[in-house]
Image (tube, rainbow, N blue to C red):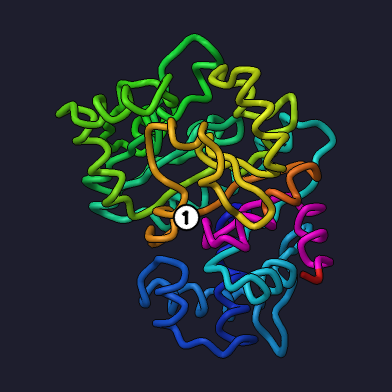
Amino acid sequence: MKKIGDLRLMMKCCSLYYEDNLNQQEIANQLGISRPTISRILKEAFEQGIVKIQIVDVLKNDYQKIERSLERKYKLKEVIVVDDKQDSLTQKQELARAVSEYLTRVVKENDIIGVSIGTTLKEIPRYVEKSNCKNVTFIPLLGGIGDNEIDIHANQIAVSLARAFGGDFKLLHAPAVMSDLSTKEKLCKDEKIKEVLDLIDKTTIAIVGIGNPMSLNSTIMASGYMNEADIEDLKKYNSIGAICLQAFDKEGKTSILEFNQRVLGVKLEDLKKIKRTIGVASGDEKIEAIKASLKAKFINSLAINHSLALKLLEDCD
């Protein structure tokens, strides 16, 4: 029996080809796989009886229609929806499994994959199956040294993913947040730091967690970088979302917060330049953060749980 990831891909190909009338090359470009692979998948779908007069639902919970609706509504390259789970850890693991399958599919030779900090992202490497990709490099999208929650830091996640994929990694040996701007400016001139920052500008795939900065369990709070004054600023400027430790308001504005300027790593505006930037989130408390990140176009792909997907579909903004 085929794995859920294979069935998910087969169903998406069929939906794009038979329902949306995309040609095989257009599907290949969108999903990041070759045209001959698309042709083979469509042939298999027909031979297995998945394609008859209509596409047959072969998944226990087939979220294809929801995914396609969200892709159209928000003009996204790809949406991945997973089952709702009762507890937070199981939910994050379910999401991590789906994102690992996505990465296995889209990562190609010579790709540079950037990762952010996050509790869901740290679970991804455990689900990655052996990859045959050559010359792929994983890098952190921001610094990450310190004693707090070391396993969720971008450096650690980059190392774990590189080992899972059999690829290389580069580390950003610096704190994610500087004490002041002058210190950040000096550090950015360091040869080793600059080498990684230059790689960030060449990133082809980015995986970023989307958080609610006001949640006590949020990554930005768990990181240990925020002091009382920073937290007060979050409240003062109505911050509702955070990506790569940079908070933003409902319009996706980031520049108003001094804390954001001290983050050493990718600027959220620069995420828009990356070919594939997938935002990863679960939990209803993150709905406003996701909506703001979509509005600001920080991401062009999305992986979320079912209840969040329904809330996004219901949104009329």
Could you say where residue 314 lies in the image, as x and y percent from the top left? 84, 66
Horizontal side of residue 258 vs 66, given as left or right: left
Residue placed at 69% from the left, 27% from the top?
232
Could you say where residue 35 lies in the image, as x and y percent from the top left? 37, 77
**What's the amino acid at mark 1?**
Thr
Instruction: Give whichever of 39, 247 is nearer the camera.
Output: 247
Q: Is residue 197 visible?
A: yes
Instruction: Give whichever of 66, 180 is nearer the camera.
Output: 180
Where residue 91 sits, quadrant-wise, is: top right
Q: Is residue 311 magenta?
A: yes
Q: Which residue is denoted by mark 1 in the rendering?
A: 277
Could you say where residue 151 lies in the image, as x and y percent from the top left? 51, 20
Q: Give the class, few, some or many, for how many residues have Cα within 10 Å of label 1's Cα (few <14, many ≥20).
A: many
Q: Secondary structure at mark 1?
A: strand
**Number of numbered tags placed on the structure image:** 1
In the image, residue 265 above or below residue 315: above
Instruction: Give whichever of 59, 296 is nearer the camera.
Output: 296
Q: Is residue 188 magenta?
A: no
Q: Main secondary structure of the magenta part?
A: helix
Residue placed at 72% from the left, 25% from the top?
217
Q: Is residue 156 visible?
A: no
In the image, residue 300 above or below residue 255: below
Residue range of the region highlighted in magenta in the rendering: 291-315
Residue placed at 23% from the left, 47% from the top?
134
Q: Quadrant of the N terminus?
A: bottom right
Could you say where residue 293 lies in the image, as x and y percent from the top left? 61, 55
Horizontal side of residue 47 vs 270, given as left or right: right
In the image, residue 145 above or below residue 248: above
Where residue 119 sits, quadrant-wise, is: top right
Q: Quadrant of the C terminus?
A: bottom right
In the image, residue 58 above or below residue 177: below
Residue placed at 40% from the left, 23% from the top?
180
